[in-house]
Image (cartoon, rainbow, N blue to C red):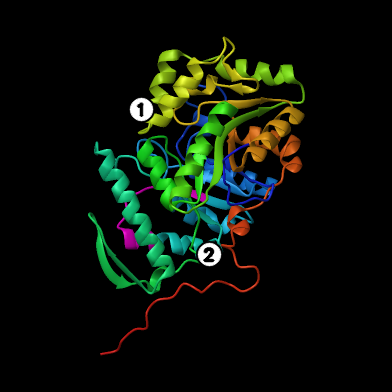
Amino acid sequence: MSSIKIRTEKRTAEIAWFGDLCGGDTQYLGVLDNERRSNFNHCKNILLNADNHGFNNILLPSSYIVGQDPFTFAGAIAPFTKNISLLVAHRFGELHPPMLARTISTLDHILEGRFILNVISSDLPGYKEDGALRYQRTREIIEILKQAWTQERIQFKGDLYEFDMPTDPVKPYQQNGGPLLYFGGFSPPARDVCAQYCDTFLMWPDTEEGLQKTMEDMSAKATAYDRVLDYGLRVHVIVREDENEAHKYTNLLMSKLDAEQGEQIKNRSQDAKNMGVLQQNTLRDSANKEGYAEPMLWTGIGRARSGCGAAIVGTPDQIITKLNRYIDMGIRSFILSGYPLIEECDLFAKYVLPELPNEKLAKLQGRLPETEPATPLTTAPLKVQ
């Protein structure tokens, strides 16, 4: 019997797509595609396409080396959206914490509660930092954000930050604690931060046995803090009506891959050598000669990109069955992608999305008001001298 405790017991999940702010969209792995560069218009088209199809969320990733700023992009795209939530990745330490609280709250009001924060604890651009510093910074900033969103004053004293100040300008649209915090990390300190402070633990592809072990470990860590987590999976997907066609498409994706060029593209990312990426390399090393670590889980994508390095490959019925098994394990969020991002989004939306339960985690967890609007964004009254 599984020892995994999940906060959202209802058999459902939030189905999300991926926004290519980091410049990896392509027809062929290992080939930089000028027609699909990470500019505002292309990324806007990816996002609005997912919104029109009914995806409930989209990840806007963060990278200094390549791509666009997620907060700026989110503010620009928000007026064009209808229903989709924006899962905005932010590297903690890049913004002064009270200003970060205000930035997030402003976007949360613009989106009327459709904002989610993906917490990143990597090195700040230009620095190689001690892990203990990075995770202490993350802990302190999360505590400051939670005070800013739920209290009348920020009253905090830590190793890195100290504040005693009002929170008038930073109350978010979402209630009961503010925007959800998603967190991904494979090292023990990363897992501990998520267990203590965050709402959803994001995993990269692994065998079902590997995912189960990770979730059991995280569930135990969260229980030690008297908390319960939700779980998410970031994974690519290739769906075709015919199974042979799905497998043929993996060969097409790889057909122009130059190993050296693939490594160069992969190593553009600042996280190319972190523990999570190394775990994806290990998964690929364990795969069979066709690149499958287990049936339907193809690991070839990791040869030309850092981060998520595997795809679920199969027919609509096979992929629906696979995702339902993940849901039964306790996974409540899926952040999906396929190359090229618009075309593969269309195929997934046609064949798979209508057959899956698809609800916003923020709604399931009571963050979004049912009828009464949240307290509007306000400022303190002006004092006339």
- The range drawn in magenta is 87-101
Vertical order, 307 against 385 (above or below): above
Vertical order, 332 against 170 (above or below): above
What is the residue that sits farthest to the front in this orientation?
Answer: 1
Q: Identify the residue at horizontal 48%, vertical 56% (top origin).
A: 75
Q: Quadrant of the C terminus?
A: bottom left
Estimate the x, y position of residue 157 in percent, counting from the top left: 25, 62
Q: Secondary structure at mark 2?
A: loop
Q: Identify the residue at horizontal 70%, vertical 37% (top origin).
A: 324
Q: Foreground residue, 362 or 245?
A: 362
Q: Identify the residue at horizontal 35%, vertical 33% (top origin).
A: 270
| First in sequence: mark 1 vs mark 2 | 2
Estimate the x, y position of residue 51 in percent, counting from the top left: 64, 49
Q: What separation in Å lies between label 1 and label 2 (alpha carbons)?
A: 36 Å
Q: Is residue 41 visible?
A: no
Residue corresponding to mark 2: 174
Estimate the x, y position of residue 320 in percent, counting from the top left: 72, 34
Mark 1–mark 2 CB contact (< 8 Å): no
Residue corresponding to mark 1: 273
Q: Identify the residue at horizontal 50%, vertical 31% (top origin).
A: 308
Q: Residues within 10 Å of mark 2 (few under 14, many from 20)?
A: many
Decide if residue 257 is on the left or right side of residue 322. Answer: left
